[in-house]
Image (cartoon, helix red, strand yellow):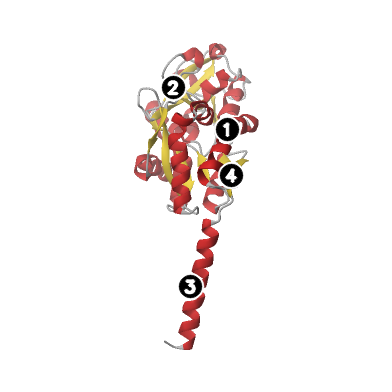
Amino acid sequence: MSAFRKILMATIAIASLAGNALAQDVKVLRIGLDGGENEADQVRRTECVKPGLVKATGVSEVQLFPSPNYNGVIQGLLGGTIDLAVMGASSYASIYLKDPNAVTPVLTTKQADGSTGYYSIMVARKDSGIKTLADAKGKKLGFADPDSTSGYLVPNVSLPKDIGMPVKQYFSETGFGGGHENLVLGVLDKKFDVGTTFGSAQGDWAQGYTSGNLHQMVSKGLLDMDDVVEVWKSPLIPNGPLMVSNKLPADLQKKVTAYFAELPKTDKACFESFTGGGYVDWAPVDQSFYQTIIDARKSVIGG
């Protein structure tokens, strides 16, 4: 072996060892919060996982990184500045289409009946006189966020089949509410005539169903379901994934996944808080579970 080749091989070996050491020496786990509800409530709901994650993984600290919108967390996961997040299927699809190796979807929430899906639900104020899609023709439609599955992607895929034309031709105007919570508040404040949010479509309407944004808003006293009506409901949407960054070492990814998988048993109250309530357990998932949403996103929005 030439002297040059020996030096080159030694350099590669040293760089590899240094890279492995850095990869294994993760001190901080960073959880992204997507802005689907107000920042204070998202932080409050998520805080409970921090001590358990520290203990389960051996890191020194778990930090929460709230974003004003979905794209901030998407970019963080793509760039490696966020290590894990729970987001909707369309947000995962956005990441996958840009870099299929950036994250791994590992778990999704499960309802009491065993289902792992939810619905896009269009609501209007009860006093608006809008009760059906026909009533909503020519009105102003609000979406939650351009990276929301139920608040944007699915309505743009499913609504044209029900109204017989493109969304922008049917409604007088469309806009974004800045997350699901703000979207519903925008409907109540007459910023939008109708708006798309999400819910389980199971259980009591007065409680905003059993899970989803409507349920969370009712639980927080932000919404009285007597003030709104359901105008439209989509086909079933797969629940969004808990995603773990592939920039984390493999053993750390396994520890993170194991911690969350056991959370419904080890700390049910924290599980309910972290997931927003209305769920009983996790179900394991992988990329294939979201292929239909990936295809839809590519078709409607692009890569």
Q: Mark 1 or 2 closer to N-term?
A: 1
- Closer-to-camera residue (286/9): 9
- Per the image, label 4 sits on a secondary structure element best described as helix
Disc 3/disc 4 C-alpha distance (Å): 36 Å
Q: Residues within 10 Å of mark 1 (few under 14, many from 20)?
A: some
Q: Which numbered tag is attached to residue 48?
A: 1
Which circle, 1 or 2, is nearer the viewer? 1
Residue 24: where, in percent of width, then height?
52, 56
| Three-letter code for the amino acid on which mark 2 is drawn | Trp
Q: Which numbered tag is attached to residue 232?
A: 2
| Three-letter code for the amino acid on which mark 4 is drawn | Gly
Which circle, 2 or 4, is nearer the viewer? 4
Q: Mark 3 or 4 closer to N-term?
A: 3
Disc 1/disc 4 C-alpha distance (Å): 23 Å
Residue 235: where, in percent of width, then height?
37, 28
Which circle, 1 or 4, is nearer the viewer? 1
> Residue at point 41% right, 29% down?
281
| Quarter of the picture holding the N terminus | bottom left
Q: Mark 1 or 4 closer to N-term?
A: 1
Residue 71: where, in percent of width, then height?
56, 43
**Residue highlighted by disc 4:** 72
| Three-letter code for the amino acid on which mark 3 is drawn | Ala
Q: Residues within 10 Å of mark 4 (few under 14, many from 20)?
A: some
Which circle, 3 or 4, is nearer the viewer? 3
Which circle, 2 or 3, is nearer the viewer? 3
**Residue highlighted by disc 3:** 13
- Closer-to-camera residue (244/204): 244
Q: Mark 3 or 1 closer to N-term?
A: 3
Up the image or down, 205 lies above or below 192; here it is above
- Closer-to-camera residue (18/245): 18
Work out whether residue 302 can be spotted.
Answer: no
